Amino acid sequence: NFYSLLAYVFSLPLGSVAYVNGLHNSVPMIDVFNSQVHALCCAFGMPFFEDTVADANGVVACRPMAWFWPLLNAFSYAGMFYMNCRFMQKFNVVWVSLINSLGPPLAAAVFTCPWIVGEVNVSTLDPWVVASFVIIIVGILIHEKNDTDTMQSTLDDGNRQTSVAHLHSPQATFRIGMG
């Protein structure tokens, strides 16, 4: 999955853009890279001093839940690739892209739940998000109907071709000639 590393590197500059980075102002690129370094160091148990807090016993560690989001991201990422493989195995590649297209509207829906994203990050559900979700679902249903019809006609054609090809195979000729 190293190809996604390239997308990660190219998406880093977005962290400096106002509003995209969750702030009302832009930040220098060096701050974006420092943020990534700090997050990784904390996730690996080697936090910078400014990223730590002391608990009641005086033990200094990363801020509460600092480990959770990188870990959730890693497991979600691995789970996404696993599910993509299972969908490709069970259905086909088109289904993988159709199912993955549901990600953005579902993510927007998640941001309406304060118990998931926190009160500070809650946003309202835009009607366009609902419309995009409906369009994707309708597209999946249309594709499924079309795919089922195409598959049936392919199977019908394949059965006719197989029976004709079977008669012209060397084994069939030998059996017919011997019979």
Image (cartoon, rainbow, N blue to C red):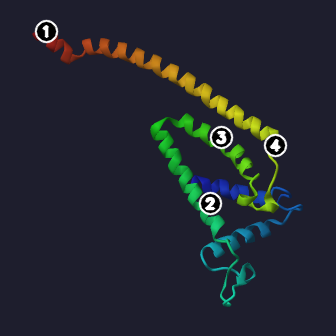
Distance of label 4 from label 3 (alpha carbons):
17 Å
Circles 1 and 3, Cβ within 8 Å, touching? The answer is: no
1 or 3: mark nearer the eye: 3
Could you say where residue 107 lies in the image, as x and y percent from the top left?
A: 70, 49
At 54% from the left edge and 56% from the top edge, which residue is drawn? 78
User: Secondary structure beneath disc 1?
Assistant: helix
Where does label 3 land, which residue?
101
At 71% from the left edge and 55% from the top edge, which residue is drawn? 10
2 or 1: tag closer to the N-terminus: 2
At 53% from the left edge and 45% from the top edge, which residue is drawn? 84
1 or 3: tag closer to the N-terminus: 3
Q: Within 10 angstroms of label 4, few (less than 14), some, or many (20 or more) residues?
A: few
Distance of label 2 from label 3 (alpha carbons):
18 Å
Distance of label 1 from label 3 (alpha carbons):
57 Å
4 or 3: mark nearer the eye: 4
Q: Quadrant of residue 73?
A: bottom right
Q: Amino acid at mark 2?
A: Asn
Could you say where residue 4 lies in the image, as x and y percent from the top left?
A: 61, 53
Q: Is residue 124 above or below residue 18?
A: above
Circles 2 and 3, Cβ within 8 Å, touching? The answer is: no
